[in-house]
Image (cartoon, rainbow, N blue to C red):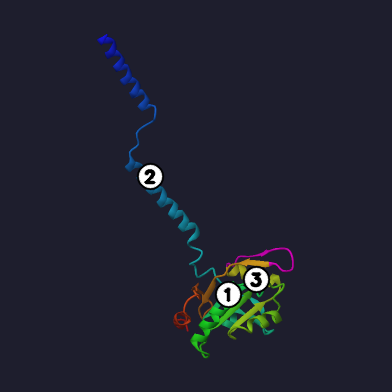
Amino acid sequence: MANGSKGGAKGLKRGAKGAQSSNGPNVSKPLLIGVGAVFAAVFAAFVFFTSGKSTTSTETIGGPFQLTAHTGQQVTEQDFLGRPFLVFFGYTHCPDICHTTLFEMSEILRAMGPDAKVGALFVTVDPERDTPETLKDYLSNFDPRIIGVTGPRASVDPVLREYRIFSKRAGKDEDYSVDHTTVVYLMDKNGRFVAPFNVARRPAEAARELQRYL
């Protein structure tokens, strides 16, 4: 009886050890944490090198263009040299963001005073509807230093590419909207890209920043 009990106990111990080993090797928690940290670092580096460079290069934003201003005159990038200027892309049928951004740009220009040598460019992403006359009427609500430009689609699209602007028509009827990039660019007096410019702040603060590039 005693021997049988001992044998049964040994069998239970062997069974317990077998069940433990069937769950796989016992990996320590510090090792798992270390592997996770390495993976996170590699992933962060991948994100940085694949998406972080394009927004900081001063060589890839902007370029030559020839379009028609809201005044009816032909304008090129050369007309903006000698002064810093802001560039914004939008359209006159835009429901809200374009009007708000142009108003903020106007407040900044007014904060700089009427004699400040600074400019602003509003490029339409909807040239089919935004004729010079339409732009002129729309821009009458804003600072007169904002120049609206339009032209044939074949002339506007290269400018969108030069400034890395996404634009896509949404809807098929005549009352369509246009999804587009809403960034405002700051260009220096030589026509070179400086940085995205934050217009959604106190006009006096933004004006002080612009003053540095006069």
Sequence-wise, which precedes: disc 1 or disc 2? Answer: 2
Cα distance between the residues tagged 2 and 3:
48 Å
Nearer to the camera, 189 or 12: 12
For this orientation, the residue located farthest to the right is 173
| Mark 2 lies on residue | 35
Asked which secondary structure carries label 3, the reply is loop
Is 174 magenta? The answer is: yes
Q: Is the C-beta separation of discs 1 and 3 under 8 Å?
A: no
Residue drawn at the location 52% of the way across and 77% of the way down: 187
Q: Mark 2: which amino acid? A: Val
User: 176 left or right of 185?
Assistant: right
Cα distance between the residues tagged 1 and 3:
10 Å
Asked which secondary structure carries label 1, the reply is strand
Quarter of the image for the N terminus: give it. top left
Residue drawn at the location 72% of the way across and 69% of the way down: 175
For this orientation, the residue located farthest to the front is 1
Residue drawn at the location 41% of the way across and 48% of the way down: 39
Cα distance between the residues tagged 1 and 2:
45 Å
Q: Is the C-beta separation of discs 1 and 2 under 8 Å?
A: no
Residue drawn at the location 67% of the way across and 67% of the way down: 177
| Mark 1 lies on residue | 88
- Where residue 53 appears, as percent x and y from the top left, is 48, 63
**Which secondary structure class fits the magenta region best?**
loop
Sequence-wise, which precedes: disc 1 or disc 3? Answer: 1
What segment is highlighted magenta in the picture? 164-176
Task: Judge whether 45 appears above or below 82 on screen.
Answer: above
Q: Which mark is residue 125?
A: 3
